Image (cartoon, rainbow, N blue to C red):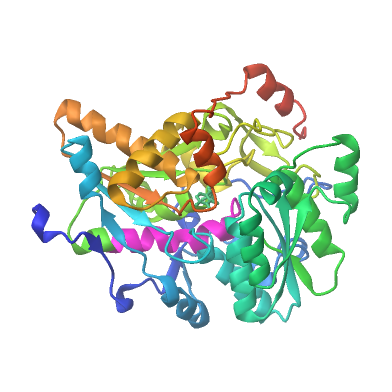
Amino acid sequence: MNKQEIPYKIYLEESEMPKAWYNVRADMVNKPAPLLNPETKKPMTEEELSQIFCRELARQELNDTDAWIEIPQEIRDFYRMYRPSPLVRAYCLEEKLQTPAKIYYKFEGNNTSGSHKLNSAIAQAYYAKQQGLKGVTTETGAGQWGTALSMACSYFGLDCKVFMVKVSYEQKPFRREVMRTYGANVTPSPSDTTAVGRRILEEFPGTTGSLGCAISEAVEAAASREGYRYVLGSVMNQVLLHQSVIGLETKAALDKYDIKPDIIIGCAGGGSNLGGLVGPFAGQKIRGESDVRLIAVEPASCPSLTRGSYIYDFCDTGKVCPLQKMYTLGSGFIPSSSHAGGLRYHGMSSVVSQLYHDGLMEAVTVSQTEVFQAAVEFARVEGILPAPESSHAIRVAMDEAMKCKETGEEKTIVFGLTGTGYFDMFAYQRFNDGQMSDYIPTDEEIAQSLAKAPRL
Ligand SMILES: *Cc1c(COP(=O)(O)O)cnc(C)c1O
């Protein structure tokens, strides 16, 4: 099909939107390892998980057998407010790079939260409401998840308590204000409002916080309140399940115009957008229907897949969550404070970890200055101001397109543009002022942090 016949933006019809989420675990030959109870070291049961998460979400977390899980009508109605998201042909970027490659991006930034996180937030809020809960607690790093959850909770009339990593709380006051506008209660973490927060403050005075630490506080805050559950925006199987709408829509849009992708690229923090985007394509690979390359992109300053170990580890600094087998840098790992590009989590989704371990997915790291170079180049030709996280995927999509220029191959490259960067202007400012540096952890630092992983 030539250029003229493929629209600049491919939108699906409402009737073509997914009616069920896709659960790649059902098709995986090697299933992700089960979550373990941190005390008994036995696999977590639905009963145990239901004390942390809503019951239906606990079920989804443990479901390794159903490939399709119906999306409740109320959630589909909410999705319609901002979905389908467009699959955009990056004609201007191709032109700029003078590449024979065809580049597409799936843009998830067209909603107020500014990212893909709303896809799971609305599902989690829905199940909490169904169960008759009063509210939910969560952590947020850069702020996108907290914003998405605030929106979802206000839609269903639930209370929402957000523990926001202190450095972001201070650097992104407007993020915080958006959450408050949607009715959420926002606390900088670590805080003295929880026992675990007080313990961490004592051990690391002056710490600017981390996701692992905010998770511990949010879990405690839920556990100590009647009618509350903890919810989280990445890493868990249930989140990847909800995010499969990204991959399903992408696949439907490509199929509609008979486009066969050669490479699919996503940035990887906890792995939720990546898992959601590549899920349906990984399923095809597992069933022997496709040999598309799947690439995870992570920051060189927080390289869990490429330099971490594949072991059981704590999901949080306070060690209150179930143990998860994943590629990890150790739960005490805190990326350098010079790191501004998001994707700061020490571990990785167990689904993504297993797909990578089985060779179904590749992983690469990029440094933050090259990421911001790509972000700026992309913004100037494609118009969208990308989130730094998303720009990791842009970087590698551009690198792959440049390889095509050398070889003359007309590969089709698809990447996930997970969100917009309007609240990341401190980071852009540092880049624009030439003050951005690249800190890469040493092997010793990673080994030290991994030495504290649990022994099983
Ligand atoms: C949260 C976030 C990410 C990273 O999270 P994943 O769970 O790895 O997808 C990437 N991009 C944006 C815009 C985000 O908000």
Residue 308: where, in percent of width, then height? 60, 29
For image coordinates 44% across by 39% down, the residue present is 392
Is 213 a magenta residue? no
Magenta-colored stretch includes residue 241: yes
* Residue 41: quarter of image: top right
Residues 141 and 261: in front is: 141
Q: Is residue 342 visible?
A: no
Question: Percent x, y for residue 372?
Answer: 44, 36
> In the visual, does 104 lie left or right of 354?
left
- Along the line of sight, which residue is nearer the eye, 129 or 173? 173
Q: Is residue 313 left or right of residue 147?
A: right
74 and 36: which one is in front?
74
Rendered residue at 85%/35% (across/down): 204
Residue 49 x %, y %: 73, 61
**The image quarter in which residue 82 lies:** bottom left
Q: Residue furthest front?
A: 433
From where the camera sits, is residue 121 visible? yes
Q: Quadrant of the C terminus?
A: top right
Residue 206 vertical position relative to residue 134 in the rendered view, above or below: above
Q: Which residues are magenta?
A: 232-252
The secondary structure that dominates the magenta segment is: helix
Q: Residue at x 84, y 51 (%)?
A: 191
Residue 377, image x and y in percent?
33, 39
